[in-house]
Image (spheres, rainbow, N blue to C red):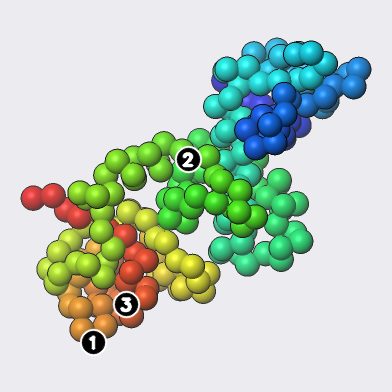
């Protein structure tokens, strides 16, 4: 798929929201196509349908990805950058357009595969979410459930407190980093990369580990 313009991406989002969340046929044309509409028709992602512009079957996954990028951008701005609520949507519109080529999956993994944006709207799952759900039961467990000596790699981090997540990022405790639990008491002491850290149980509960398979 060729690169899609920003107008077309935003129109894809609107078409998806209207069809999936607002029970509308599409976007009313009112005698003319909205900005980006001709481009989507040329790409086979949208079609004219009874006075509206509607998604084609090929357009549905592209539109879902556009919505996913926008809502992940909102989560990133709210959880990590603590952006004012009034500015989140405006800034997310700018940020979403650079979340291509796997960067959206990296952000999703960093945020712990969030299911909802800050406004409570669902985030369409990506491939990384499906892979996580397929393997989470046998392979992934929170750090607090490990026993001393167990090793693995950080799969994802899920923190309700943005300050805690920022602290872990500053420590370079990030998805993909090898981790080795050394002890559990009086705090959870572990090696991550080439450094040792101690955290309390609340933080250890939010660090999910993909265990090494022997």
Q: Residues within 10 Å of mark 2 (few under 14, many from 20)?
A: some
Whether label 1 touches label 3, CB < 8 Å:
no
Residue 148 place in picture, x, y as percent: 14, 72
Q: Is residue 143 left or right of residue 57?
A: left
Which residue has dot 1 on it? Answer: 186
> In this view of the protein, can residue 35 be seen by the observer?
yes
Task: Look at 71% across and 63% down and name the residue there.
Answer: 85
Which residue has dot 3 on it? Answer: 201
Among numbered discs 2 and 3, the one appearing first in the sequence: 2
Q: Is residue 147 left or right of residue 88?
A: left
Above or below, comparing residue 206 to residue 130 in the picture: below
User: In which quarter of the view is residue 96 placed?
Assistant: top right
Residue 75 place in picture, x, y as percent: 58, 55
Task: Look at 29% across and 41% down and name the residue there.
Answer: 134
> Which numbered disc, 1 or 2, marks the residue closer to the eye?
2
User: In which quarter of the view is residue 158 placed?
Assistant: bottom left
Residue 78 place in picture, x, y as percent: 61, 61
**Label 2 – label 3 distance at C-alpha:** 29 Å
Mark 1 lies on a secondary structure that is: loop
* Quarter of the figure that contains the N terminus: top right
**Label 1 – label 3 distance at C-alpha:** 10 Å
Among numbered discs 1 and 3, the one appearing first in the sequence: 1
Which residue has dot 2 on it? Answer: 125
Among numbered discs 1 and 2, the one appearing first in the sequence: 2
């Amino acid at each position: 798929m060729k690169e899609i313009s920003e107008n077309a991406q935003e129109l894809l989002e609107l078409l998806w929201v209207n069809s999936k969340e607002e029970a509308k046929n599409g976007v009313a044309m009112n005698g003319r196509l909205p900005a980006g509409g001709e481009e989507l028709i040329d790409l086979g992602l949208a079609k004219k349908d009874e006075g509206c512009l509607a998604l084609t079957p090929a357009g549905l996954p592209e539109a879902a990805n556009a919505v996913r990028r926008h809502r992940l951008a909102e989560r990133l701005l709210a959880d990590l950058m603590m952006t004012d609520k009034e500015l989140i949507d405006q800034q997310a519109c700018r940020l979403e357009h650079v979340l291509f080529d796997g960067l959206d999956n990296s952000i999703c993994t960093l945020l712990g595969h969030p299911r909802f944006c800050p406004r409570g709207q669902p985030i369409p799952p990506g491939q990384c979410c499906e892979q996580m759900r397929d393997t989470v039961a046998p392979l992934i467990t929170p750090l607090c459930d490990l026993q001393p000596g167990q090793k693995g790699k950080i799969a994802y981090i899920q923190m309700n407190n943005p300050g805690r997540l920022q602290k872990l990022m500053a420590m370079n405790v990030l998805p993909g980093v090898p981790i080795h639990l050394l002890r559990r008491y009086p705090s959870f002491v572990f090696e991550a990369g080439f450094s040792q850290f101690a955290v309390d149980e609340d933080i250890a509960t939010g660090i999910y580990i993909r265990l090494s398979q022997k």
